[in-house]
Amino acid sequence: MKFVFKVALGAAVALITAVCAAQPASFTVVPNADAFVTPGASGSLSSSNFGAAGSLAIAAPGLPEGEFQSVLRFDLSAAANSFNSQFGAGQWTIQSVMLQLTSSPHNNAIFNNIAAGQFGVSLMQNNLWVEGTGTGGLPSSDGISFDSLQSTYINNANDQALGTFGFPGGSSGQNSYQLTLASGLQSDVTSGGVLSLRLFAADNAVSYLFTSRSGSSGKPDLLVQAVAVPEPSTITLCALALGLLCLVQFVRRSKGGKSHR
């Protein structure tokens, strides 16, 4: 009888493991546009564009070279198509979305000195901003600027907070930040839509410099993980397996209690 119990117990555990475990799938997306914006130390760069610069930046207001914010836009159609192909259309759900940034060195006097601190990430509702062609050494006026970000593209009523994160400092290495799965973020991923992120200082100390999509390596990306939505038959099998496991445990306890009488 003990042998039968052991076999039944092993079968129940194996069934639960095989049927109920969700195997995640991953897809990495790089931006199709990004830019940093700044008013500069004196406000003279408020209308300038830096969309083709090799680095992006976040810096707190009040620092010597002024405030910096960065925007990144991602086309998620390939990610959704990949998950639809693997799991079936509508048969998957998002497990996590990770923003990955590669720190870069300070090599331009336009930037503040690198310093650890906190920054926020916001999901923008307006994706119509233009990257532009300006660089840190040669700004332009053909794309998003600090002024247009503030006046046109930020929508405090509808943009969604995706978390506040810590930058440890340093000018090399990759840092990963798990974004809050806000409703807008989930909708953009599952529909294969376009997603824009705004990165900005969340304290008075941070100065974060990281490689842009125009950089030679270490481009920013989103690492999206999804898992299959269990079908009703799968849920039923899981329930049966759990029931079998409970039954085995109950019988074992019952027999154990009788043996001591």
Image: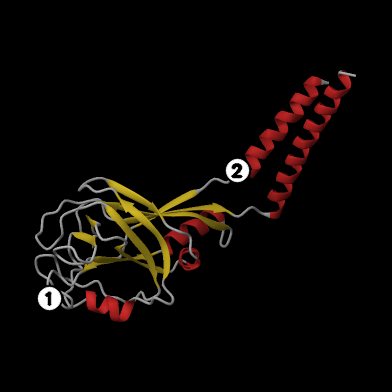
Among all residues in the image, which is located at the extreme right?
261
Earlier residue among tags 1 and 2: 2
The image shows residue 67 at horizontal and vertical percentages of 21, 67
Residue 50: horizontal and vertical position, in percent? 18, 69
Residue at image coords 32%, 61%: 202
The 10 Å Cα crowd at callout 2, few under 14, some 14 to 19, many 20 or more, is: few
On the rendered structure, is 106 left or right of 183?
Answer: left
* Image vertical order of residue 162 relative to residue 175, above or below: below
Q: Quadrant of residue 57?
A: bottom left
- 257 sits to left or right of 108: right
Kindly identify which numbered label has been placed on residue 21. 2
Q: Which element is circle 1 on?
A: loop
Closer-to-camera residue (48/195):
48
Asked if residue 254 lies left or right of residue 106, the reply is right
The label number, if any, that marks residue 44 in the structure image: 1
Q: Hey, which quadrant is residue 78 in on the image? A: bottom left
Up-down relation of residue 113 to residue 143 (above or below):
above
Q: Amino acid at mark 2?
A: Ala
User: Quarter of the image containing the N terminus?
Assistant: top right
The Cα atoms of the two marked residues, 1 and 2, are separated by: 56 Å
Q: Pick out the residue farthest to the bottom.
A: 151
Query: Is residue 145 shown to the viewer in this render?
Result: no
Q: Amino acid at mark 1?
A: Ser
Q: Are marks 1 and 2 in contact (CB under 8 Å)?
A: no
